[in-house]
Each structure stands twice: as structure tokens, then as C-alpha cells.
Amino acid sequence: MSLPFLLEIGTEEIPDWMIPNALENLRLLFEKLEIPHEWVTLDATPRRLVLRADGLPERQADKEERVMGPARSAPPQAVAGFARKQGLKPEDLSIAATPKGEYYSFLKRIEGRRTVDILAEALPSLILEIYFPKTMYWTAKGGPRFIRPIRWIVALLGEAIVPFEIAGVRAGALSSGHRRLGAREIAVTTADYERRLRDHYVILSAEERRHKIRQEMAGIRVKADPALLETLVYITEYPTAITGSFDAQFLELPQEVLITVMRHHQKYFSVEDAQGGLAAQFVAVMNIPEDPDGFVRRGNERVLRARFNDARFFWETDQKKKLADRKQDLAHVTFQAKLGSYLDKAERMAALARELGGDEHAVRAAGLAKCDLTTELVKEFTELQGVVGGLYARAQGEPEPVWQAIYDHYRPESMEDAIPRNRTAQTVALADKIDTLRGCFRVGLVPTGSRDPFPLRRAAQGVVKILVEARMELPLVDFLEKNRELIDFFAERVKFYFKDHRGFKYDEVHAAMAAGWSNLVDLEARLERIQNLRPTPDFEPLAASFKRIRNILDQAKFTGEGAPLDERLLEPGPEQELYQEYQRIAGQPIENVISRLRPRVDRFFDKVLVNAPDARVRQNRLTLLHTLLAEFSTMADFSEIVTNS
Amino acid sequence: MQSFQEIIFKLKQYWAQRGCIVQEPYDVEVGAGTMVAETFLRVLGAKPYRVAYVQPSRRPADGRYGDNPNRLYKHSQLQVILKPSPADAIEQYLGSLEAIGIDLRRHDIKFEEDNWEAPTLGAWGIGWQVMLDGLEITQFTYFQQCGGIDLDVVPAELTYGLERLAAFLQGKDSVYDIEWTEGFSYGDVRYLDELQYSVYNFEMADIATLWKLFELHEGEAARLLQAYDPKAPDKRRFPLLPAYDQVLKCSNLFNTLDSRGAISVTERVGVIQRVRKLAVGVAQAWVDQQQEPAGEVAQ
């Protein structure tokens, strides 16, 4: 018989952004139990993680196992004793022939365990193993840890409850509805579970909640915001979109400020007017089906009005003191105890911007970029740092490249974020990030594991992204103060960028970086060449030969120093031919010569013994191989390429 | 319309009916209800405790001379501690909102992740900010650590922002328009506090004097902590509660100095560390003091 399975872990409100990963993790943990099933689906609301599956067997298949007894030659008492121990009569035993001789034995039937027992045993630890970035205990010290307290558990296999307990909560058949619109306890079965939840104002499927919100916003020009939509989907059990409005006079404030208040502080969608500007409207998503009295709409409007009033107050107050006049105030804002104030940082940034080839605008912007940290608006809306400085700079008549550079200098904030918009802004962003990295590494603030309080990984990633995507041919390593740790750290970020973000294969990245990576634009070009070359028929065999050369040189501890190549020592035939080919093709791109080079190399290895008895000949051959390798390793170290051959 | 004070009465009544001791505000100035010994020290150890109190909370830097409709130097928190936290802590909390007339089937309530942390107290917890129609009205926290000590049992802490809640219930855009009781607005009662403390904190507080006071209180707390002897047979007499008052004084002086712009950010971290050290010292001594003397533990 095959059975449906339902597991609902009922909790207090789980942070929305953790839910999708937790579900995926729950699926993997379930699959690891290796209980056969036809399908498995996962669902969640903020208050429940749900796994449903069907087609589970009632019990595992029975197994047979041969139990060996005494040898055929054993005395009858021993045979009877063995049979008795197994609950059998001696005549039930059979004789098994083995290479060691003949033995009494019998086939023991092992009954398959009941699935319900397997689940009851496995589920408590399985549930507590679900990975969350931060967990808590809620009973007492040493008690179970989970993302939020577990308050109920539904665990049904067919009609039977899977009996287990976590933190005093017994698994059962009682779920729970919407906090205020549903019943606290709802009896469910595997068949009616989803419908029963719906009756109690819980829409189980995230897709359905997402669809409901989308549909309700269909007639409104909402600024698309998929991340906000996901947040709202996982912060509600019964979402409903409502529209509110605000006084149009607030539209005088910069859009960036208005949108931040709506988006980050209130989780509202902003709305566009027909011309693509901001409309004096917003869409909020509530966790109830309707707002017949307008309580929710009016409440949200009032909150937004207060927030906008604050923002306007800050915006006006801040304007009383120009950005440039705030620079000295930065002396009182610590960047990092050992690295001084933001004034120190601003001065370092300005100097670095110049070293990076920045013009006067870049130097000025670098000096002013951090001044907005002293404004009320940034103290209130820290996520607008940089943007606010840029807006003030514009309002105060700074030249366009200057205010734009201030505005953009925190970019890119993620791998998906755009890089700063022009060269001036790119230079200032680089100066900021490289200064932070140099300083932190100098005083030992190096990221370890998940600890990275100054987001140094993100900063380095941003540097890499800007240099490559803005095509800035700067020698990055020259700006890293010969700090080995920092150089290695950057090498990791460069690898990550090209491998994980750009999709190059790891061996290609290793090969290309082994030939140098300080100029990232050049590195990218070489990577693209390798990528193009890779599918050609001669590439992998040649890469394999290069690896062989590298091994030979390594084994001989050959460094390339010593006597130059002596042509007279070259043996006629494959060795001389290889050398002549080398002379013809040296200096040309490998793409043009690979098809000529490869057969020569192959023949050389076929016919010539590198390890010649004559030491001078041997040395000369190593020199030949070394010369060849060096010639083609300026693009990449091909011996790093993983080949099948 | 319910007045400000009626809302407070009802909430106190509600929690009294659920087994809470109702305390009056603590009489030393604090930045938050959490800092009062009724929370800070009582959450330590395994003894159950339930308490509710309104605590005027002073944040010198938040003063706005009474000009800003939403921001106050001194606001009122209703602080509730349920130790251990009951399984229906959130249900009980939602019940309290209904007790003051909020029909939660017609309002939007959401629990948004917000893990609370107080570095000067070595305290943190896991929880939410509770949003009512888009307005943050309560911080709900399951304490995990206090005074740098992992808690034996986990209390639930509810901190209601009473002015916000009252403005919401009365439909007021400015806290100063809240009706405190018939015939008296919040502004009638509190405006001068806001104005005069803003003048003092931002303009007139004498920095040298405040530093001197800070050092005196710090010295007194440190002296007491040094004198605490865990092996003393009569250690229960030892004045840890007064020592903690000295810590609270330090904390408030620090906040005042900060709002006066007298603490450079470099000094800031150091001063926070000094206060934290004292707070952690009191917490550790308190845990020790609460334990039965070793000789009396039955084997």
C-alpha cells in the first residue's frame, strides 16, 4: 500500500528571506532518508514549513539474509544448539557450500521496518538540522535551537500520526489557522490539509500568494520590484494589496528619498504616473483579505506622512550647511579606531584618486564623498549614504561629474548592481574601496569565515567588477602595497568573479591567472581566447603536452637558468624540427600556430628521450622545453588545464 | 476615545490578570525599560518572574525642542517580562491589543524580523518589531543573553511604545495632540520637558561637570564591585542594586555627553566598553548572589 505523507512544522514568524533556502534544505534532508516516494512538494508561510509527499510504502521491503551455522562435520548437539538459538528445528537448516567447506545455514527473513517508525525516529533531528543563518533557543539553556519557537507539528503518514516530540511539542493532526481570522486548532488530514488552511485564511502556496498580489496590482503602474514582492509573499499568510495616497507636495523631495522610505521602511511599492515620474500613491500589502472601513489604508497613510515629514525636515535642515563645509566635521566621525577619522579617509581617498589617474573632478569628489555621513538624512536613512551626498552636491551647484561621482561611489553594492556611471565616478569608487581594503588589511582586520564586518569581500568584488567592466587597464597589484595577504585575497575575488559570475571554467581561470592577473582587462581578454581555443581539436592534447613539459622540468628541478640553447646539440629529426617550428612561430598568437605546433610536440615526445645519457644533451633538451613553455605561457599556463587525455 | 492614561490602565490591568507584578517606573533615569533591574537582573537565573511597568525612557539625542511631532527626548515604554516565556506569548500579546480596542480582524498586524541588541548591557535577543497598519508599535524579543551571560530560561520581553500606540488609537498626527486625559493634551503635560531638556542636553550641559560625574559614578560602581566577596556568608546583604544604580547613572551621563557632542567617535567605543564592563560585572555578581550558599545545597 502506498501512503501520502504530510509534515507541517508550525512556528512563530520566520524571517521571510530565510524561508526559500530552509525549504530546499528540508527537501534534501528528507531525500536523504531514502524512503521511496512518487513526488514531494514544499510550501511555506511565515508560520509553517510544509513538506508533502505521496507514494510512501507502508513498510520497507522484507529482506533475506543467510545466517551461517556450524560446519557440516560439527557434532549434532552443536547443530541443535544453533537451530534452537534461531528458533528453528535442526531439520529446517540447509547445507550451504562455501569455499571454506560446507556449513549448516538458513535463510532468515528480515521484516522491513514500518515507514512510520522510520519517520518517527528520524524527524526530530531532521527538523532541527534544517539550516538557518541564525538560530535561538526558547525553552532553556541547552534546549533545542531553531529559527523561531516551534509551536505545533503536524506529521501524518496516511491516516496515522507519526509520533514524536520536539521541545515539548507533540506531533499530531492539528494545524493552526491565520493568527486572527482562523481557528487556533484545525483538525486536518493529508487529503484536506490545504483546503482546511484556506478555510482558515491561510493560502499555503507561495505561488498563489504571489499571483494574488500581482493580480490585485494589475491595474496600477507599480514600479516593478521582484525582491519586495518575495518579501511580501513570505511575510503574509493571506496577502491583499491596497492602494494609498500621499500629499503631492512631498513630490518636491528627491525620488530616491521617497522611494527609500516607501520601499525599505514601509515595504510599499511605489507607483509611477503616465510620464514615468513618481505618482503620489503607494501599494501596501496587508495580511488580511479586506479593509472595508479603510482602517489599514488610513493607518499606512498616516505613518507615511510622518515619515515624509521627517525626511523633509532633514532635507531642509541639512541644506543649511554645505557639503564642502562639513568636511572638517568628518574629523569627529571615526572610520575605524586604528585607521583614524573619515577626514583622514577622505584625504587618503583624494590622494589615491589622483594616483589612479583621476582628474580634478575625481579628486574633489573623493574629498567630499563621505561628507554626507554628518547629515541628518543619512543618519536617518543610512542606506542612502552616497546618494544623499550626491543630491546635496547637485543642489549646491557642484559640477555634474563631481555630484555623480559622490552619488555612485558605493557602487556596485552586489554582483548584480551596476558599476558607477562614468570614469570619474569609477575612479572615486575604486579609491574608496581600495583605501578601505588596504587600511583594514594593514591593521589585521581580515575577513575570516563568515565574519566580514567591513564587507571587504564585497569591496574587493566591486573593485574587480569596476576594473573589468569599465575596461580600466590599471595594474591592480601595484596598488596593494605589496601586502601578500591582500594580494592573495584579491586573487580569490578575481577567481570568484570570472568563475562564478562570468562562467569561465576554473582551470581556465587558473591557467590564465598563472600568467599574471594584475591587469584585469588583459586577463579577461586572455580568458576569452582560451575559451575560444578550448573546443579546437589541438588544444587539449597540447595542454596535456604542456603539463608533461611542466612535470619534466619540475622533476629535473630545472629553473631555466644556465647555458642558453645550443643548436649544435639538437638531434636531427623531431628535436631539430620542433626547434625550427618554434623559431618560425615564436611571437605569434597561439591561435594561429596551434595546429602546426601540436604535431611537432607530439612527435618530439614520441621519438626523443629527454632524459638523455649525455648530461649536456639532457640539459639542452630541458632548455628547449623550457623555452617553448615560456613562449606560450604569456597568455596562460596551459599545464593548469584539466584534460581528459 | 480612550485617553492616554486609560490605555495605560487597561494594559496594566490586562497583564495583571495574567499574573504580572505591576511595578511603578524606576526612579533612576534610563534609556529604555530593559535597563531597569526589574528586567536586566531579573531575567538572570532560573527563577520565574512576570512583571509589567511603564518606564519613562530618556534619549537625550532624540530631543527636538518639542518641535518634531514624532520624536521625543523622553517617551514612555510599557515593559512586560514573561519569564519563562509561555508557549502562547504572542497570543497573549495580541490579546493585549484587543484589550485596548484594536480589532485585529480589521487591522493589519505583521511580525517583522528585528533582533534586539544593547551593547552597553551585553544583552541581545531574537525577535520582531510588531507592525500595526505599517506603524511599529512594539518590540518583541526572546532574550538570549544578558550581562554577557547565556540565560538559563528564555524570557519574552514586550516593549510597547505608548505614545505611538496612543496616537494610533486617537488618530493623531502629532504626539503633542494626544489626549492625556480629558482637558489635557500630551503637550500640556510634557512640552516643557521636551523643550527644556533639549536646551540643556544640546546647549547648556556643562561637559566638564558631566565627565566628572561620570567618573564619580563609575568609580563608586567599580569600588562596590571590587568589594563583593562571593565567599562571604552574608553576601545577600551586599548592595549590588545600589551598585547597578551607579551604572545607570553612567549610562545616562554618557548619553547626555553624546548628545552634547562631547564624545568623539574614537572615545565612544571606549566609553561604551567602560559602561558594559560595569553592567557585566553587576550581572555576574548578581547571579552569584542569587545562588544558595554552597553549604546549604542538599546532596
Image (cartoon, coloured by chain):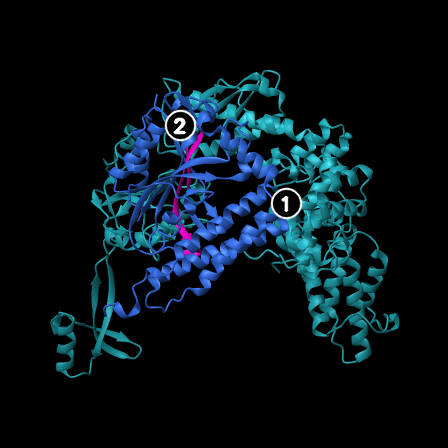
Chain colours: A cyan, B blue
- Tell me the quarter of the image containing the N terminus of chain B: top left
Residue type highlighted by circle 2: Ala
Residue B166, numbered circle:
2
Prevailing secondary structure of the magenta residues: strand
Residue type highlighted by circle 1: Arg
- Tell me the quarter of the image containing the C terminus of chain B: bottom left
Locate residue B253, reporting x and y percent: 53, 47
> Is label 1 in contact with label 2 (beta carbons under 8 Å)?
no
Q: Name which quarter of the figure residue A629 lies in.
A: bottom right
Magenta region: which residues? B126-149
In-image side of B136 versus B195 (left or right): left
User: Disc 1 on helix, strand or loop?
Assistant: loop
Locate residue A431, reporting x and y percent: 73, 46
Locate residue B106, reporting x and y percent: 34, 23
* Residue beneath disc 1: A502
Taking the spot 12% from the left edge, 73% from the top edge, the residue there is A84
Q: Is residue A105 magenta?
A: no
